[in-house]
């Protein structure tokens, strides 16, 4: 019988294909697990003994700070200090944002040319009925290399992250900022929210997303930036939202939360170069503007069922402000109220 094409393969010999991968590819694979599990791979073989010390992707979760008291210190001491940190992912309890180990880890990352930081805070413990705010230490955020910053606070009735009125991000390379579930303290003198000055030193900011953010005393939320091109606002809770963005091209507004402002929230928009406007909400968009002369497309969807005929005047006023738009998309309920 003729020999088959695979008969020359030595029986019982198994190639370790993972160990033959490049360091960069192994790093990428290990970036999807926590750094604690990554360190444990040193027991697999001599190939993995020091691979974790050169990881540019740092992925920490709450267990790395609560159950292993000295883990962060040991990790930073043994990590190759000559290797830059590409990204830092923190998945922690909300009360851990003030933990010394968390602060030490962030300082280390910012001193190693970090490009991306994502912090996710989960509700932690039971604080009873008392509403409390945890101040996020934005003073740690000072970097000339950071391009993407994401702060996510999964909403809780009694636990929220707070940004103080005088908080300022000194991130000149930042292009993308994502904030979710953040509570902002207002400046008593200006009666406006911290967002006004928060990214005043982020000169290259292009993309800003605010999700379920609010102000402590329902003051105005002011967003001013000369270079902002894309803005997304989702379920904002404030007295009004004021946007001054001369280079803004795309604006997306969603207001479909049962706990939102019941249609009273006013959006005051100054964006002469706006090309695309998308709105989705339970009430007609309460919009004030000096005109959108460059607007190419608008997608307006009011989700109330049925739509109150008393809202017709506001809808008419909105459509009048959009008279320059080239492509207008409306849901059927709006058209029915408009022609009734």
Image: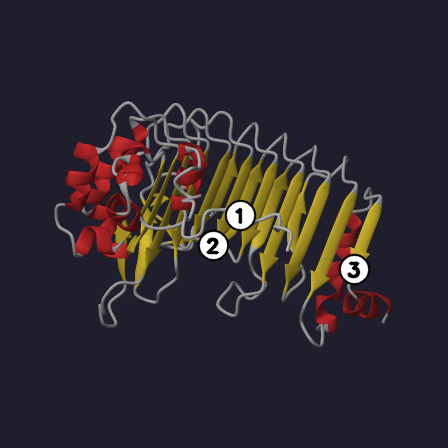
N-terminal label among 2 and 3: 2
Q: Report x, y in % for residue 334.
A: 78, 65
In the rendered image, which residue does mark 1 sit on?
241
Neighbour tally class for label 3: few under 14, some 14-19, many 20 plus, Cα within 10 Å: few
Whole-number angstrom distance, CA of label 2 to CA of label 3? 26 Å
In the rendered image, which residue does mark 3 sit on?
330
207 lies left or right of 76? right
Front-most of residues 110 and 191: 110
The residue that appears at 28% across and 47% down in the rendered structure is 44
Residue 89: name its quadrant. top left
> Does residue 171 sit above or below 27 in this rendering?
above
Q: Which label is found at residue 238?
A: 2
Neighbour tally class for label 2: few under 14, some 14-19, many 20 plus, Cα within 10 Å: many
The residue that appears at 41% across and 30% down in the rendered structure is 146
Q: Which residue, as the protein is rendered here, is positioned at the far bottom?
A: 306
Label 2 element class: loop
> Which numbered mark, 2 or 3, is in the foreground of this view?
3
> Does residue 65 sit above or below 257 in this rendering?
above
| Quadrant assignment for the C terminus | bottom right
Can residue 59 be seen from the camera position used here? yes
Label 3 element class: strand
The reply to whether dot 1 and dot 2 touch (C-beta < 8 Å) is yes
Can residue 314 be seen from the camera position used here? no
């Amino acid at each position: 019988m003729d020999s088959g094409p695979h008969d020359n393969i030595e029986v019982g010999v198994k190639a370790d294909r993972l160990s033959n991968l490049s360091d960069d590819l192994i790093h990428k694979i290990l970036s999807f697990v926590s750094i604690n599990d990554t360190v444990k791979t040193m027991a697999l073989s001599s190939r993995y003994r020091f691979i974790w010390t050169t990881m540019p992707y740092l992925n920490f979760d709450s267990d790395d700070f609560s159950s292993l008291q000295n883990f962060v210190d040991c990790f930073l001491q043994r990590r190759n200090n000559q290797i830059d940190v590409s990204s830092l992912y923190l998945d922690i309890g909300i009360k851990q944002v003030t933990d010394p180990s968390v602060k030490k880890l962030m300082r280390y990352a910012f001193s190693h040319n970090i490009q991306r930081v994502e912090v996710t805070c989960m509700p932690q413990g039971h604080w009873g009925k008392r509403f409390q705010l945890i101040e996020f230490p934005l003073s740690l955020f000072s970097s000339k290399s950071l391009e993407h910053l994401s702060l996510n606070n999964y909403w809780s009735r009694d636990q929220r992250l707070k940004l103080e009125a005088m908080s300022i991000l000194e991130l000149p390379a930042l292009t993308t900022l994502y904030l979710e579930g953040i509570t902002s303290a207002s400046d008593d003198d200006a009666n406006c929210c911290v967002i006004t000055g928060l990214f005043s030193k982020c000169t290259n900011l292009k993309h800003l997303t605010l999700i379920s953010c609010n102000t402590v005393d329902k003051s105005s939320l002011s967003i001013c930036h000369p270079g902002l091109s894309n803005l997304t606002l989702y379920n904002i809770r404030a007295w009004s939202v004021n946007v001054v963005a001369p280079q803004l091209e795309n604006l997306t507004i969603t207001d479909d939360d049962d706990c939102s402002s019941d249609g009273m929230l006013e959006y005051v928009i100054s964006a002469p170069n706006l090309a695309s406007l998308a709105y989705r909400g339970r009430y007609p968009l309460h919009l004030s503007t000096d005109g959108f002369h460059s607007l190419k497309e608008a997608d307006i969807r009011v989700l109330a069922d049925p739509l109150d005929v008393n809202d017709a005047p506001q809808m008419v006023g909105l459509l009048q402000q959009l008279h320059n738009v080239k492509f207008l998309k409306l849901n059927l309920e709006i058209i029915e109220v408009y022609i009734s």
